[in-house]
Image: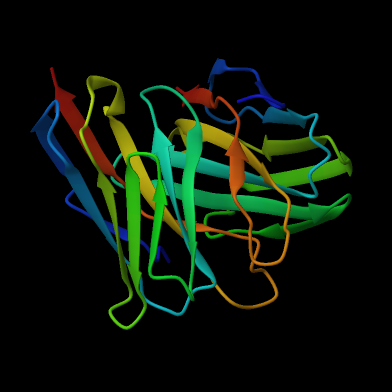
Amino acid sequence: DAGITQSPRHKVTETGTPVTLRCHQTENHRYMYWYRQDPGHGLRLIHYSYGVKDTDKGEVSDGYSVSRSKTEDFLLTLESATSSQTSVYFCAISERSGTVNEQFFGPGTRLTVL
Amino acid sequence: SQQGEEDPQALSIQEGENATMNCSYKTSINNLQWYRQNSGRGLVHLILIRSNEREKHSGRLRVTLDTSKKSSSLLITASRAADTASYFCATAHPGGSNYKLTFGKGTLLTVNP
């Protein structure tokens, strides 16, 4: 987890409230990702970023938005949280060198939406 | 849609035995990677094998890749209790977004002392 932090680590919120999760890196990597992990589904990509202010949708982006105003920070916002968004959220970073693109993961944020 | 599918979903072995996990994918790849996740932690990269490679070793890990069958296997030799974790394969595919990875659902490995 070195070089990548996520905050908060745990959060309980009510349905309908907005929630923002933060990912911070000190590695100066270009690419950043938000995943959610749910039993039976493995890891699914929500949004990713390929540079400052450059973001795109992943496979499960509905209900989520992201922003990246600095290289080191990637924010994930749940506009109006729903119970189906209860999950563990992981941020990851990577740098690409040729076809090598291993990802480094943060410690995760456990979000519960009541 | 998810590409990698690990098999088996769960595996329980005794310490000292070898553990083999398999991964199948659907479309051509640039590389395939294996990650480990200990309970309650983030994923950790273990090993990467490129599409033009057939076998790779790293310590007690051995990865094979058969692109004709679109499958890979991860072998952990002489397993230890500390190897207990979930193992995921992840694939990188050709194209403009080839820095992205698609993860499978994982194999839960339990190594009993």
Residue at x 37% of width, y 47% of height: B88
* Relative image position of residue A55 (x, y in whole percent): 77, 56
Q: Position of residue A81 (x, y in %)?
A: 57, 34
Pick the front one: B106 or B36? B36
Give residue A19's quadrant in the image: top right
Q: Looking at this view, is B22 or A15 the one in front?
A: B22
Q: How many marks?
A: 0
Is A40 located above or below residue A73 in the figure? below
Vertical order, B34 against A1 (above or below)? below
Residue at (16% x, 41% y) in the render: B18
Q: Is residue A54 left or right of residue A107?
A: right
Which residue appears at 23% of the width and 51% of the height?
B21
Residue A46 x, y percent position in the rendering:
58, 50
For the N terminus of chain A, which image quadrant? top right
Q: Is residue A8 left or right of residue B12?
A: right
In the image, farthest residue toward the bottom: B68
* Residue A77 versus residue A50 in the image, above or below: above
Rendered location of residue A107, percent (x, y): 56, 25
Identify the coloring.
Answer: rainbow
State which quadrant residue A71 falls in: top right
Measuring 83% from the left and 35% from the top, which residue is drawn there?
A: A72
- Which quadrant would the C terminus of chain A be assigned to in this image? top left
- Residue B61 appears in view: yes
| Residue B92 in sight here | no
